[in-house]
Each structure stands twice: as structure tokens, then as C-alpha cells.
């Protein structure tokens, strides 16, 4: 079903009234303490991986061996964060001590994201560059000196097939961007145990028995066997699983918003298009997808705390940070995402809160930081 278009401006509704937590959070891969670690995009052993010294276009690189990256891998670093060796005097934001980060006073290169143009459903571009992890590089004094980046997944054919499936589904700009980012962040089709593209066997089972009746009915209508091996899913089915996953999180809120704006068939997945800014939508989606292992209420509260920290800086009253991420929270997020300055603050605060969930994980820090740096 094509995603509805959202041209009606939202009315700010800072309280999530009448909505309750009635859908279970689904498991995302790799809970804390998991013995399986993802190392999909690390440089080959013995290679001297370059570190970008700027943000746009061709940039000079350092040729120093990334000894720090090797040490970080041994400590469980995931997804190819680049940490320069001590010889370069540059380190990743993910590895910088908190006091050292604070010492920089929040200074960073000019990297405010540009507002992405909305893509009408069915008209999304079929070729987009594969997302990368971008992490801020700091010198020994904690000053930001550049941005290091590395592709998240490295199978161009699988990447193209995923984008083709998104186009075929006729998703809007928010879903298109969000599902690209989640797919790439989860390593694409590289199998990680029984997890592929972030979909686990438990994901399929829980969607099949979801306590949100609408999400359960939609999943069952797809005809996907809940006992399927995630590796056996087609690109189109993976997109459908992503969509129903977010339906399970946000259907009640979407129904409330849909009634208000004249879109009675609005589903949770459509929240990503309703937000209006694809980058902010992708950051929200990745936060919920990766954070759902922590519990739906906790990850909702994390986003609400980031919203309130941003609203405080732009002179707005806080919303109720109760963990129920309903229509009021979504509208508050949407409002902040509409302005480039408040959006940048929002994505910074969201990354800060995400890092607190797993403070010892360099890979999780890079995954969170990606959205504060992405252009």
C-alpha cells in the first residue's frame, strides 16, 4: 500500500494523551553481553586505512597505520570506526574521554545537515550512495579536526536490490532514507549468526504474534512463515518486515495523527514520512530499531529526553518524558526537525542520549554519532 502524503501542517501536541503502551518492543540483534559481535567493515588486517581530514569532496589523508583501530577491534569495536594511531595525535570521538570531549566546548567543523527534499511515494531515487559511519576526529587536546568515515556494508548488488525493493514498495522519503540506514548499519546481507539485515528469527515470531492487532494482521497478510530463516527473505520481504516493525511501535500514535490530519489509514511506518525531514526520520528509526532491545518505554524516554533538551535551548516547554512515544512526542520531534538549527541540536542531543545506553561500546557510539554528522 503506497504511503500517504503529508502536506497538512501538524498542530503541536506536547502531551501524548489517550495513548498507552500497548505494543511489545521487538528484539534487535546483539543485546548487551551477546557473544556475537559484528565486525563487517573493518579494514583488512595489516592495511593502513586512510582517515579523512575534511568533510566534503576529495580530502588529504594520513598514511599512518591505524594502530588504535586494531586495539579497538580487540576490545569489541564494531563497524569500522577509524581511530588514528598515537603518531597522528588524532582520535575518534567515540574513544575520547568525556572530560576531553567537554573541553572542546562543543566546537566542531561546519557540518550542519541540509534539509532533504521530500520524495513523493513511488518516485524515490533508485541509486543512492551506500551510507557510511562518520565519526568526529579529535586531536590530543579534544579539538575536532576532521571526520573519518568508512562504508557500513560492502555488497553493491545487495545494496541496489534493497533500494529497488524500496522503490517497488512506493515508500516516501522518510521510510526510504530510514530503511537504507538501518539495512546498512546492520551490515546488509552479511550474516551475523542467525541475524540478517537486523532481522532475527525472534523478530518474525514476535511480529506474527504481536499484541498490536493491526500490526499482527498486516504481518500475517504478507504470508511470511514466522519460522523462516531471515537469510531466506527476499529484498521486498525485508522492507515489509521493517515496515511492520515500526507499525508495532507507533500504530496507536499514527492512528491519532491520521484522524487529526485526514489520513485515517495512517500506520506506524508512515510516521517516518510524516516527520518531514528524511535525515531526522532516519535517526529516529535507527534509535528505535537498535534500542528496542533495551525496551520500548526506555528508548521512547531516551528520545523524549533529547526532545526536551532541545526545546529548552529554543525556549519551548518540555513534553512529558514518560516513555510513551505517542502523537505528542512525534509532533514535538517533527517541529524541531523542521528548522535546520533546532534539528542539528536535536540530532546532537539524540546521539548524546544514545551513547549513554551503551557507554562502553565504541561501535554503538559511532552508530549514534553518524546522524549528528551526516549531511
Image: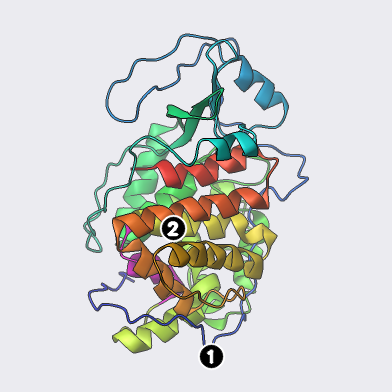
- Can the viewer see residue 107 in this picture? yes
Q: Nearer the viewer, residue 176 or 88?
A: 88
Nearer to me, 179 or 93: 93
Q: Position of residue 39 (x, y in %)?
A: 61, 31
Residue at which label 2 appears: 346
Residue 226 visible (yes or no): no
State which quadrant residue 87 falls in. top right
Q: Nearer the viewer, residue 215 or 349?
A: 349
Looking at the image, which residue is at 67% across and 46% down? Answer: 194
Q: Residue 125, which numbered label?
A: none
Location of residue 172 by image quarter: bottom left
The magenta stretch spans residue 322: no
Question: Where's residue 54, x and y in %?
Answer: 35, 26
**Where residue 18 is drawn, which disc sits there?**
1
Stretch in magenta = 267-278
- Which is the main secondary structure of the residues drawn in magenta? helix
Please state, as top left, top right, bottom left or bottom right, where the C terminus lies in the image: top left
Amino acid at each position: 500500500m503506497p504511503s500517504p502524503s503529508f502536506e497538512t501542517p501538524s498542530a503541536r501536541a506536547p502531551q501524548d494523551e489517550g495513548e498507552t503502551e500497548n505494543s511489545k518492543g521487538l528484539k534487535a540483534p546483539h543485546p548487551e553481553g551477546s557473544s556475537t559481535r559484528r565486525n563487517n567493515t573493518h579494514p583488512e588486517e595489516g592495511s593502513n586505512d586512510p582517515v579523512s581530514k575534511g568533510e566534503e569532496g576529495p580530502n588529504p589523508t594520513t598514511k599512518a597505520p591505524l594502530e588504535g583501530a586494531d586495539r579497538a577491534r580487540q576490545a569489541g569495536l564494531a563497524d569500522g570506526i577509524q581511530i588514528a594511531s598515537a603518531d597522528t595525535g588524532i582520535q575518534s570521538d567515540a574513544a575520547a574521554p568525556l572530560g576531553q570531549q567537554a573541553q572542546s566546548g562543543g566546537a566542531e567543523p561546519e557540518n550542519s545537515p541540509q534539509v532533504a527534499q521530500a520524495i513523493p511515494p513511488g518516485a524515490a531515487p533508485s541509486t543512492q550512495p551506500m551510507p557510511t559511519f562518520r565519526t568526529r576526529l579529535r586531536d590530543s587536546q579534544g579539538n575536532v579536526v576532521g571526520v573519518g568515515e568508512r562504508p557500513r556494508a560492502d555488497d553493491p548488488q545487495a545494496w541496489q536490490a534493497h533500494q529497488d525493493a524500496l522503490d517497488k514498495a512506493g515508500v516516501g522519503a522518510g521510510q526510504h532514507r530510514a530503511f537504507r540506514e538501518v539495512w546498512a548499519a546492520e551490515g546488509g546481507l552479511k550474516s551475523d549468526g542467525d541475524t540478517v539485515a537486523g532481522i532475527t528469527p525472534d523478530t518474525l515470531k514476535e511480529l506474527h504474534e504481536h499484541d498490536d492487532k493491526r500490526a499482527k494482521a498486516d504481518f500475517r497478510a504478507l504470508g511470511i512463515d514466522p519460522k523462516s530463516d531471515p537469510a531466506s527473505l527476499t529484498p521486498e520481504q525485508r522492507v515489509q518486515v521493517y515496515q511492520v516493525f515500526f507499525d508495532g511501535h507507533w500504530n496507536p500514535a499514527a492512528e491519532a495523527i491520521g484522524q487529526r490530519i485526514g489520513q485515517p489509514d495512517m500506520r506506524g511506518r508512515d510516521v517516518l514520512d510524516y516527520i518531514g525531514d528524511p535525515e531526522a526520520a532516519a535517526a529516529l528509526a535507527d534509535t528505535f530499531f537498535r534500542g528496542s532491545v533495551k525496551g520500548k518505554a526506555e528508548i521512547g524516554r531516551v528520545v523524549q529526553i533529547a526532545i526536551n533538551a532541545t526545546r529548552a535551548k529554543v525556549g519551548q516547554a518540555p513534553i512529558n518524558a514518560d516513555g510513551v512515544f505517542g502523537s505528542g512526542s512525534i509532533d514535538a520531534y517533527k517541529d524541531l526537525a523542521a528548522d535546520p538549527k533546532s534539528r542539528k541540536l536535536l540530532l546532537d542531543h539524540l546521539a548524546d542520549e544514545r551513547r549513554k545506553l551503551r557507554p562502553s561500546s565504541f561501535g554503538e557510539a559511532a552508530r549514534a554519532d553518524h546522524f549528528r554528522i551526516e549531511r
